[in-house]
Image: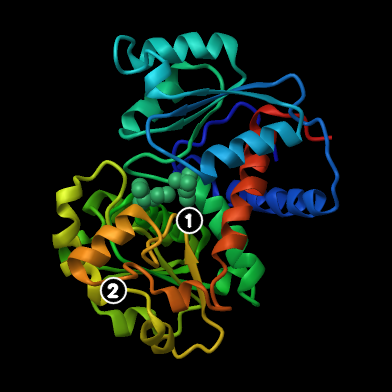
Amino acid sequence: MDLQGRNLLKETDLTAEEFRYLVDLGAQFAVAKHLGQRSGRLAGRNIALIFEKASTRTRSAFEVAAHDEGGHVTYLSPEDSHLGHKESVKDAARVLGRMFDGIEFRGFAQESAEILGAFAGVPVWNGLTDQWHPTQMLADILTMREHAGKPLDRVSYCYLGDGRNNTANSLLVTGALLGLDVRICAPDELWPAPETCDIARSLAARSGASLTVTADTAGAVRGADFLYTDVWLSMGEPEENWDKRIDLLLPYQVNAAMMAATGNADVKFLHCLPALHNADTEIGQRILGSRGLAGLEVTDDVFESPASVVFDQAENRLHTIKALMVATIGQLA
Ligand code: CP
Ligand code: NVA
């Protein structure tokens, strides 16, 4: 499998075989990391990390993965680069592409990622846009593989919450690509866009995936191997939308009753993180004060339960992002 020079701007940039290959490579890198093995697969490589939005996991994963393999990173935030203010994405792409071997981009518009990908001349990896979160999917599929207790192609997962955010879009399309049983459960007004469903349907026609988009929680979660949720208000959405979003999504909260409604005693819980599961955050405090809710998209008991594999999932960002960078710009010995 040769992915040298390739972009990952959205899941459909990969075939199912290529996607599975990156997950396999991530699994190998996880073992190596736990054995304390280091290598120089990114030695001499310079990597730009552009972040228009905040990040804990994605930035850390790119930085640590690069350092583990002997690469160097440069972090560029909107405050300390011209990008978007007085330099177009197209111009920045052509400049950065002359200096760096690979570019990570996290931002608002998918179009910015696409322009970078088209004009940089080096691999560009989407670290989250308003539309897609493909590097998250590599980690999520690795985590499902580790925790499903069955072959990946027999896995079913149900995403509950804002069904048309980046994570939900990516989960729908990823499951469709890989031939899984995917359920997106959300109130009608937060369903994935018709274009996203069209992409997923055409992939499913080839892969044999089962796709469901529904507002009915009981039907959606029944028999699922994994329940997955994400923050109810994504980065970039106006804060004043919180109240309406809470009203809409409270019936879709992942709590003990929702886990039990799967009828699967082994059901596991996934979340890309960060999660609002208690009042230990500024937003959590505010919503506890205004709405009397300590947990939002997931309750603390589920988040902290043995069924929750969210920290394995977070760690897998490191191994799979390492796989992505090594496969596209590194040296695979
Ligand atoms: N899951 C995820 O992308 O986390 P960060 O926003 O911390 O990068
Ligand atoms: N949907 C979330 C994902 C965070 C990793 C957001 O965009 O804020």
Q: Quadrant of residue 308?
A: bottom right
Q: CA distance from mark 2 to mark 1?
A: 25 Å
User: Which residue is tagged 1?
Assistant: 177
Give the number of the disc on residue 252: 2
Whether residue 96 is visible here, answered yes or no, is yes
* Residue 287 found in image quarter: bottom left
* Residue 264 appears left or right of 261: right
Determine which quarter of the picture holds residue 108. top left
Secondary structure of residue under mark 2: helix
- Image position, residue 26 (x, y; %): 69, 49
Position of 300 with respect to 198 (left or right) is right
Q: Residue at x 60, y 36 (%)?
A: 62
Left or right placement of residue 234 versus residue 265 in this view: left
Rendered residue at 78%/35% (across/down): 332
Across and down, in percent, residue 300 comes to: 43, 73
Q: Is mark 2 within 8 Å of ligand 2?
A: no
Q: Is residue 326 above or below residue 160?
A: above
Q: How is the image coloured?
A: rainbow
| Amino acid identity at mark 2 | Tyr
* Quarter of the rendering occupied by the C terminus: top right
